[in-house]
Every structure is written in structure tokens, then in C-alpha cells.
Amino acid sequence: MINSINSWMAGNGSGSQVYAYGAIDSEPGFGATYASTKAWADAFDSATVSFYVDYGSADGCPERIYSNGPCNHGWTQAEEEYVSWHGAAFPMPEVYTTAVWHPLNHPTWVTDAMALQWEMIALYGKTINDSMAFLGPITEHASDSSTNTPTQGYNDLWYALNDDSRVAQSPLYETDIQHGY
């Protein structure tokens, strides 16, 4: 489908201005198995030259360790890293929560558990010589004003990633998803 959309746009003169990517909401806390999610990711990767964005969560993954710790429903940090950063994938993780945590190396910085989970997944990636590049976080403030604004989500992810020089980076985007439209 992504190939067809990009071919159509190129054939209609908009290919230099617009490009379609795929997306998956990979969330181990909502029952999807790693095997089925990996199968989708591998199939996407083999069927197109386009990228996809994983705008999922890291439910149950550790916030303080990066030794391939367990996540919800039998997933691991390695499996989260694979689905969000192999071949065609780019991570754009959910960073909704407003609960605060203090990162390990900078006790005056404030971030949230969701961002810390992704910092640990990125650090796990470094243990296998893989350096994740985050597009940015995704929030849902427009649909639920009790959650992070796009700027809060971005800052939380930035602080978490920049807590450790091995994964330090400035993600590219702030995003907010709207439900029900």
C-alpha cells in the first residue's frame, strides 16, 4: 500500500513534496505478541523501500536497567528495540504520562517513566552496537488534557536520552495524536 501511494504521488507531481511512511502502534501492554508484531515488521521491511514509525509504548519495560529486561506479555527490551529500530523502523514512542521521575545521572532533571523506559531500550541497543535515533515522542494531550503536552513529552524524552552520553540526542519532532476524529 505504501509503495502504491508513493508511486501515485510521484506520478501526479507531488512526489518531491510528500512521501508516505507506514506506522505501527506496537504496545506489549495491550496483548500483541512479539512474534506477530515482528512478523508485521519483517513483512513491511521486505515489501517496501519506505520507512515506518513505531509510535508504541514500552509497557512494563524497566526504567532503571538495560540488560534485556522483561516487559509486559513476555516481551523484552531487545524485542522492543528490534520492532522500533530495525531495517525500516524509526521510534516515535508514546510519552503521555505526567508522573515525574528523576533520571539516574541528573537528579535535578524531571522526566517520566515512559521516557525512561525508552532510554533503557536505547541503552540496551548500545550494548549490541546499535544506536537508535528517535524521531520524537508522541503525546495525546489534544484528546486528554491531563496528559503531557507535546512540549512536555519532548522535554521528558530529551531529558531521559540526554541523561547518558551514550544515547544523547535531540529528537526531531514534537507530536500529538488526536483520537476520535
Image: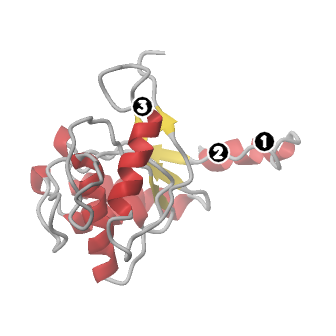
How dense is the environment of label 2, judged by Cα within 10 Å: few (below 14), some, or many (20 and up)? some
**Nearest to N terminus: mark 2 or mark 3:** 2
Q: Residues within 10 Å of mark 3 (few under 14, many from 20)?
A: many
Q: Nearer the viewer, residue 71 or 38?
A: 71
In the rendered image, the residue lying farthest to the right is 13
Q: Quadrant of the N terminus?
A: top right
Q: Which residue is mark 2?
A: 20
Element under disc 2: loop
Identify whether 134 is placed above or below 57.
below
Does the residue at mark 1 contact the one at mark 2 (Cβ under 8 Å)?
A: yes
Q: Residue at x 80, y 45 (%)?
A: 17
Total numbered labels: 3
Q: Seen in the image, is 49 located left or right of residue 133?
A: right
What residue would you read off at disc 1? 9
- Tell me which numbered mark, 1 or 2, is placed earlier along the sequence: 1
Looking at numbered disc 2 in the image, what kind of residue is underneath it?
Ala
Kindly report the distance in space between the C-alpha atoms of the residues bearing marks 1 and 2. 9 Å
User: Between tags 2 and 3, which lies in front?
Assistant: 3
In terms of depth relative to the viewer, which is nearer, 34 or 174?
174
